[in-house]
Image (tube, rainbow, N blue to C red):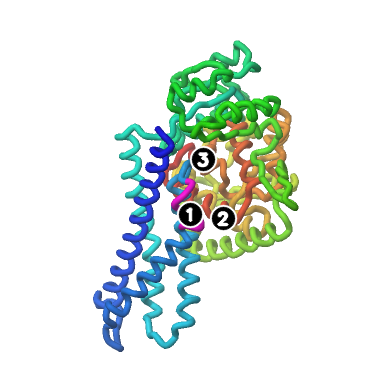
Amino acid sequence: MTESGKGRERTFDAIILIITDLLMLESAFLMTYWFRFFSGIWLVPLGIPPLSLYLPVSLLILLVFFGIFYTSGMYTQRGGQTLVDDLYGLFKGVVLASLLVLAMAFFFKEMAFSRSFFGLFFLSSFGFLTLGRILARIFLQSVLNRGGTGVRTLLVGTSPMRRRLLNLLNELPGIAIKPVGWVSTPEDSPEGLKPVSPSSVLDASGKNKVSRLAPVDLPDLPLLGDVSRVREIVLANKIDLVVLTVPFEQLPLVQKVAAELGNLNVDLQFVPDLLALHTSRMRLKEIGGLPFISVREEALSGADRIVKRSFDFLASGLGLLFLLPVLSLLGVLVKLSSRGPVFYRQTRMGRDGVEFEMIKFRTMRTDAEQKSGPVWTTESDPRVTPIGGVLRRYSLDEFPQLWNVLRGDMSLVGPRPERRVFVEEFSRTMPRYFERHRVQSGLTGWAQVHGLRGNTSIEDRTLFDLHYVENWSLGLDIRILLMTIHHVLRGENAY
């Protein structure tokens, strides 16, 4: 694909998304107008206002929404955006646009508009925008598959980040990046040019469990040559993007490849081996015109902890209040299904290694670990009661932990807490495992919404948990909570 071809494709994607959003917003506006004034559900004591009075306002609202969506990157930097990313961006945009429109309405008091109309519109707009984004993504994906388009990509090097990149492309097929091959570097050993054995870690039962992030090459990614011929390979294969996945020891190679491709219309990206630095992110800062690369920062600042704790306290308190009838019903079912207490209490390790008593609905027999000792639950575990299997399938047994959140023992979002025996075992094989405890443990986490729950790789879970620790934000917490609903309904690894 030529540079102009890439530009046309990106412009086409943006145009489709913009048109879809505007059409959905106008549809939500008109539907709200009909529902508020013509459905008969709402009283209209002052008469039905003419549509001509509201239509100019709709155009102003469209402009406000478009401006917020554009500045927040909803139409640019589309690579790697999942549907959840889109929904989270839409949610933030609707909230900001609603506040801005209401603030603007304050200066137009002389124009009488129905406040209930705007309230209904702001609620319906998110639903319409969500539907529009789903349809737009389906359309764009069909165009991508039918046309065989995509950013033709060449990978350079064999660092672990290359494996993670390929896994990412495999898990998110909507990304337009299309790897066509890779080139080796002088430091690559002969063994490195062949598929290597998967790395493995010990699971809770003491058996080897293959990690999803093991450095294994996909069989359909051909070796196109050596990096010394990178310019020739790029031209011969019509490459649009070159991605360097080399360790930090080969940083001079980045400069060399950049010089080789200097006068070509080819994008060049560098994916650093963050695992080698024992971190999951690098942040670029500028101080007095000098660039600083932050490798590791404090997990949560004082202000962050206040914000997170306030959110947890309010959300868990409201959750317990609204779920009280459901909790009561589930408690009765647990009591009637088997002998023993309704709640199961177990000591878990939280932030900074401080232990607390976690509470859940009991889903196993009371003598579940009498013979085996501390072990993880497995699929079709005979110790699980009939009602317990249903509770585990939909994570209903976790609801009582809202009390732990309200008390401050846990957070709504964070690494899942484990028992001391498992923490000590995993810390011996993974030196960074205990860093999960730099933040409060959670009911759900970044690892869980990526399918890493139950008897899955501890190594992968740790990597995802550390990513959360080093990238915390209130927005990330809200995003994980939204993703949790989807994964609970799927029930993946829920046993």
Residue 340, position as x, y percentages in the image: 56, 47
Tell me if residue 142 comes above or below residue 308 in the rendering. above
Residue 450 disc label: 3
Q: Which amino acid does label 1 sit on?
A: Tyr
Of circles 3 and 1, which is in front? 1
The magenta segment is 70-77
The 10 Å Cα crowd at callout 3, few under 14, some 14 to 19, many 20 or more, is some
Regarding mark 3 in the picture, which secondary structure is present there? Answer: helix
Residue 39 is situated, as x and y percent measured from the top left of the image, at 25, 74
Give yes or no for residue 72 being in the magenta stretch.
yes
Circle 1 residue:
88
Which sits in the foreground, 43 or 326?
43
From the viewer's perspective, tell me whether residue 66 is left or right of residue 32.
right
Please say whether residue 92 is visible from this viewpoint.
yes
What residue do we see at 29% from left, 69% from top? 30
Asked if the residues shown at circle 1 and circle 2 are in contact, with their CB atoms under 8 angstroms apart, the answer is yes
Residue 355 in view: no
**Of callouts 3 and 2, the N-terminal one:** 3
Instruction: Tell whether 192 sits left or right of 131.
Output: right
Whichever of callouts 3 and 1 sits on the residue coming sooner in the sequence is 1
Amino acid beneath label 3: His
Residue ID for mark 2: 475
Amino acid marked by disc 2: Gly
Name the front one of labels 3 and 2.
2
Callout 3 touching callout 1 (CB < 8 Å) = no
* Residue located at (56% from left, 62% from top): 315
Q: How far apart are marks 3 and 1 (CA)?
A: 16 Å
State the image coordinates of residue 117 (x, y, percent, origin top left). Answer: 36, 76
